[in-house]
């Protein structure tokens, strides 16, 4: 399975990318995300964007480090992240991981979450990963979920106005054939009671969020 990772420009949310090095086949830096890949000593297969958030010196470093550098004008229809995503689609992956795309401007964060819809509509598994959360958009059917000690809390948020027939098995708070709608908090802050569980539903689109509480220093 070909997996592509795209690194955006939200510096306070980056996880340790070394954890994912063995699982990722191609790394794409979106604008200043390329600098984070270099900082974490991860290969930059593609560097894409207008690079308006980098200095001339930093752009030179990126060009020397990456395999392919694609610079776009700052006045364009797509964000740098969407340009990186379009490049990823052209490489025909089965999975796309998005890092550094949350925790900054709220308008960017909301639209970046919506990009998961574009990914799943291309029959590709997609996830947004940061220090405290993993987000995945799912379609109707039965889905297996495994316990994750780093992201122990599991929430389900309806992406469409209604998600019909949601059932949760293997959770502390089980559910059977329940419809959930926009604004419902019924499926927030659940946990698995064993190593694995399942969730299934009949209609709609559901956002799965695995998370951990922010550690205060």
Image: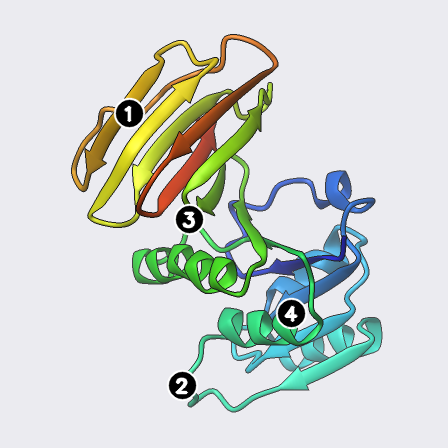
- Measured from the top left, where is residue 210 in percent x and y? 47, 31
- Measured from the top left, where is residue 62 in percent x and y? 74, 73
Q: How far is the residue under mark 2 from the one under mark 3? A: 23 Å
Q: Earlier in the sequence, mark 2 or mark 3?
A: 2
Q: Is mark 3 on a helix, strand or loop?
A: loop
Q: Earlier in the sequence, mark 4 or mark 1?
A: 4
Q: Residues at badges 1 and 2 in contact (C-beta under 8 Å)?
A: no
Q: Which of marks 4 and 2 is nearer the N terminus?
A: 2
> According to the image, label 3 marks what residue?
103
Q: Earlier in the sequence, mark 1 or mark 3?
A: 3
How is colour applied across the structure in the image? rainbow
Instruction: Give me the disc on residue 177.
Output: 1
Vertical side of 56 occupied by 214: above or below: above
Q: How crowded is mark 1: few (under 14 residues within 10 Å), some or many (20 or more)?
A: few
Camera-side residue of 96 and 69: 96
Q: How far is the residue under mark 1 from the one under mark 3? A: 34 Å
Residue drawn at 36 percent across, 62 percent down: 111
- Measured from the top left, where is residue 198 in percent x and y? 50, 24
Is 58 displayed left or right of 103 in the figure?
right
> According to the image, label 4 marks what residue?
88
Q: What element carries label 2?
A: loop
Is 8 displayed left or right of 40 in the figure?
left
Vertical side of 176 occupied by 127: above or below: below
Which circle, 2 or 3, is nearer the viewer? 2
Residue drawn at 26 percent across, 50 percent down: 160
Which circle, 1 or 3, is nearer the viewer? 1
Is 176 displayed left or right of 171 in the figure?
left
Which circle, 4 or 1, is nearer the viewer? 1
């Amino acid at each position: 399975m070909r997996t592509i990772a795209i690194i955006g420009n939200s510096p306070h949310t980056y996880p340790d990318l070394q954890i994912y090095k063995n699982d990722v086949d191609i790394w794409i830096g979106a604008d200043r995300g390329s600098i984070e890949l270099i900082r974490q000593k991860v290969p930059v297969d593609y560097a894409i964007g207008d690079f308006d958030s980098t200095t001339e010196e930093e752009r030179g470093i990126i060009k020397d480090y990456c395999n392919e550098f694609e610079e776009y004008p700052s006045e364009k229809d797509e964000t740098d992240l969407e340009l990186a995503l379009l490049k990823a689609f052209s490489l025909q992956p089965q999975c796309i991981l998005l890092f550094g795309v949350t925790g900054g401007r709220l308008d960017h964060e909301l639209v970046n979450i919506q990009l998961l819809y574009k990914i799943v509509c291309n029959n590709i598994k997609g996830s947004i990963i940061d220090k405290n959360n993993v987000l995945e958009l799912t379609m109707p059917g039965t889905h297996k979920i495994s316990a994750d000690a780093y992201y122990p809390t599991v929430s389900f948020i309806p992406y469409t106005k209604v998600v019909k027939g949601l059932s949760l098995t293997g959770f502390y708070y089980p559910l059977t054939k329940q419809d959930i709608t926009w604004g419902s908090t019924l499926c927030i802050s659940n946990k698995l009671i064993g190593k694995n569980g399942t969730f299934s539903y009949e209609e709609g689109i559901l956002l799965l969020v695995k998370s951990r509480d922010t550690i205060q220093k």
